[in-house]
Amino acid sequence: MPKRAFITGITGQDAAYLAKFLLEKDYEVYGAYRRSASVNLWRLHDLQLDGKVKLVPMDLLELTNIMRTIQEIAPDEIYNLAAQSFVGISFDQLIYTTNVNAVGVAYLLESVRTIRPEARFYQASTSEMFGKVQEVPQNEKTPFYPRSPYAVAKLYGHWITVNYREAHGMHASSGILFNHESPLRGREFVTRKITASLAKIKHGQQEVLELGNLDAKRDWGFAGDYVEGMWLMLQQPTADDYVLATGESRSVREFVETAAAQLGFQIAWEGEGADTKGIDRKTGAVIVRVNPAFYRPAEVDYLLGDSTKARTKLGWTPKVTFEELVEMMVKADMDRAARGELEHLNF
Ligand code: NDP
Ligand code: GDR
């Protein structure tokens, strides 16, 4: 009998890579999508997984739906990847974000405890929980200080997972993952916004790249590497919490510079004290303009992860370097721009 994995948030970035990873390990993979007028399966398509994942409609806000789904699938492993995952919007949609990212985890855990307590459970926790810098680098013992409604809700998801492990003996692990990106990243996140915008500019489909805080620093890895870490956590005899990170941190500005260099672009920075005059289009310089509209009410300035525990206990190690990641994303967006697939996107 193949093992049965159940992934929530199957239309998202991580779920696509995880589904591919698990299918290659001969798992039977079930994926929950939420009903909408147009369910978006482009990521599964991109990884050539059409028809390979068994799709089930399930919303994290609907307890009865969750209970029936767990009953029907009877999964061996559950990966809770569903979330309102965009930090920026969580300041405007705080109740919704709290319901999905916090209460939704409780619905799911309680359903598993009641119906399928032997299943192993993975919760998608986040480096955003570290928030305001307390210490650098951050590991499993670093105190949390969330800086957004997203991160506050995720902190509940993290602790309730720990609590179900300790109170009910469930095999429930929380992966505290630092930013991980890919060509399948949602376009509102800064890395993809940069690569898609620069690709459009290269193809004459966009004039300017507008960004918020250029000085924020993130520990960026490749999503495909991180899903292996999720799986490894559920293969351990006992459940635990683990940080997954590359151990390198770059600013948003450095991400722009790296991507621009790969495209042979010079950058003309605008705004925030930059000299806005004398940008000569003939030089081919690309205008990157700071627009305060993209600032956050409270920012996370500096994330740098220490994943020694995962490296030692799980034998996990990220393989794709920062430069390779940027290159992979730039190439994918250049191909998409050439096919006219990005033209309808506004950033
Ligand atoms: P995505 O935004 O790409 O995917 C999120 C998924 O959650 C989508 O499939 C979305 O469905 C689904 N979803 C949202 N609301 C609900 C709901 N009410 N019921 C059911 N499903 C819902 O995120 P990622 O793949 O990047 O991230 C996966 C998880 O890991 C998330 O929980 C995220 O918060 C967390 N995380 C991500 C990191 C990263 O760097 N990528 C780092 C650390 C943690 P739909 O398509 O319908 O919107
Ligand atoms: P993050 O990712 O908030 O780290 O959350 P995002 O790419 O949105 O922001 C990273 C940093 O870039 C700064 N920034 C901008 N961000 C966006 N989106 N758009 C801009 O124009 C822009 N300009 C500057 C931000 O202020 C921020 O400092 C991601 C998500 O995947 C979460 O779900 C996950 O938990 C964390 O990573 C780890």
Image (cartoon, grey):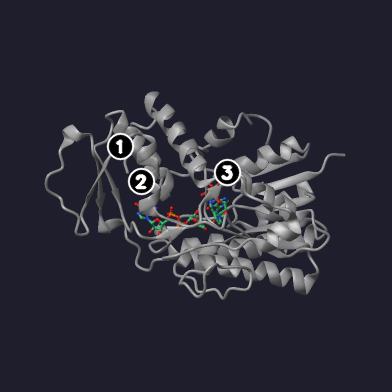
Which quadrant of the figure has residue 247?
Answer: bottom right
- Residue on which the image places disc 1: 265
Secondary element at image label 2: helix
Secondary element at image label 3: loop
Mark 3 or mark 1: whose residue is earlier in sequence: 1
Is residue 250 or residue 344 the one in the foreground?
250
Mark 2 or mark 3: whose residue is earlier in sequence: 2
Residue 28 in view here: yes
- Residue on which the image places disc 2: 257
Amino acid type of the residue that numbered disc 3 sits on in the rendered structure: Val
- Residue on which the image places disc 3: 320
Determine whether 294 is above or below 224 in the image: below
Which quadrant of the figure has residue 29?
Answer: top right
Residue 12 in view here: no
The quarter of the image holding the C terminus is top left
Residues at discs 2 and 1 in contact (Cβ within 8 Å): no
Determine whether 7 is above or below 313 in the image: above
The quarter of the image holding the N terminus is top right
User: In the displayed structure, does residue 19 sit left or right of residue 341?
Assistant: right
User: In the displayed structure, does residue 78 sit left or right of residue 259?
Assistant: right
At x 38%, y 29%, the residue is: 337
Q: How far apart are the two marked residues, 3 and 1, measured between alpha carbons?
A: 24 Å
Determine whether 254 is above or below 299 in the image: above
Instruction: Report x, y in % for residue 222.
Output: 56, 46
Determine whether 292 is above or below 51 in the image: below
Instruction: Report x, y in % for residue 329.
Output: 47, 38
Amino acid type of the residue that numbered disc 1 sits on in the rendered structure: Phe
Mark 2 or mark 1: whose residue is earlier in sequence: 2
Disc 2 packing (10 Å; few <14; some 14–19; many ≥20): some
Instruction: Report x, y in % for residue 297.
Output: 34, 67
